[in-house]
Image (cartoon, helix red, strand yellow):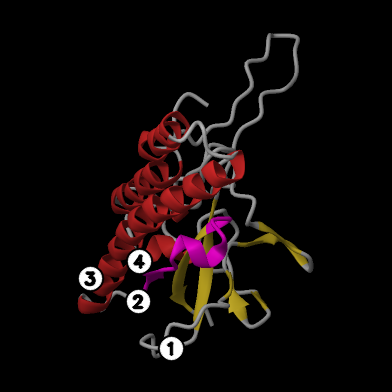
Amino acid sequence: MSDTNSNNYNSNASENGPVTTQFYNYHEYHCPYNESLIITHHPNPYPFPYLDMETRVVRIPRLPTVDFPQFSNCLPGLEPVAIRGNEENKKEADGFRFVPSTYTYMNQHFGNTSVSPLSNYIEELEFTGIVDKINAYLYEIYAGTGTNMIWLLANTVLLDLPSIVILLIQKLLGLQLIQAKNFKLEAYVDDLNGTFRDHRRPIRIVQPRESGYLSLDWVIPSQI
């Protein structure tokens, strides 16, 4: 990919070469009992005591990065290969709106497109800005040069010490830096959740650490 915020995972195929692969939200799937129904939200395993309601989770996929976690900044339904509806599904503003089907699955309403209920609570531009900021924090935590410079300094200054001692010092210094930077990320997410709560917006962001950085999870009201 050309940069850390790219949401297309395309292979440069020749005209007669392999089919180009595009990134999509792998947390969505067809309902096993009604293939026209697209499952875009899931049971909520996270406790949010100040949300006095039944809730669900919309999972934002992690991008195929190896060295550090990054998440798709596409609001679900706007990915390059998303299943999209007709003009009836589009919002007047940016993005799309969630249109629930009359058919329910596991006592929940779903739609016939990749658009999730999250689109009814946040606009595309705000969503993209938030995810880009979280991605920037994650890049700083896991791919920034600060920790690498500490490791290089430890190797240079402590060259005569046994390698196991150098390794322990590297890990200790690196861990302290990561913890300090991770605190900034978690404070940012806490501030966002506080703002959502103050404005009576029924959405919350789960700390990426709690999902093991496998997805960026958003808590939304249940779609009963």
| Front disc: 2 or 4 | 2
Residue found farthest to the right: 33
Magenta region, residue range: 202-215
Q: Name the residue furthest front.
A: 160
Q: Residue at x 34, y 61 (%)?
A: 183
Residue for badge 4: 121
Give how far apart the Cα atoms at labels 2 and 4 are: 8 Å
N-term-proximal mark, 2 vs 3:
3
Give x and y (percent) for residue 38: 64, 60
Q: Is 207 included in the stretch rendered in magenta?
A: yes
- Contact check, label 3 and label 1, Cβ < 8 Å: no
Rendered position, 9 above or below 89: above
Mark 2 vs mark 3, foreground winner is 3
Whether residue 96 is visible here, answered yes or no, is: no
Q: Which residue is mark 3?
A: 195
* Residue nearest the viewer, comparing 145 with 160: 160
Q: Earlier in the sequence, mark 1 or mark 2?
A: 1
* SS class, disc 2: loop
The amino acid on which the numbered mark 4 sits, given as a three-letter code, is Tyr
Circles 1 and 4: CB distance less than 8 Å? no
Identify which residue is drawn at 43% across, 64% down.
118
Which residue in the structure is indicated by mark 2?
202
Q: Residues within 10 Å of mark 2 (few under 14, many from 20)?
A: some
Q: CA distance from mark 3 to mark 4?
A: 14 Å
Q: Amino acid at mark 2?
A: Pro
Q: Secondary structure at mark 3?
A: helix
Asked if residue 34 is among those painted magenta in the image, a careful observer would answer no
Q: Earlier in the sequence, mark 1 or mark 4?
A: 1
Nearer to us of marks 3 and 1 is 3
Residues tagged 2 and 4 counted as in contact (Cβ below 8 A): yes
Q: Amino acid at mark 1?
A: Met
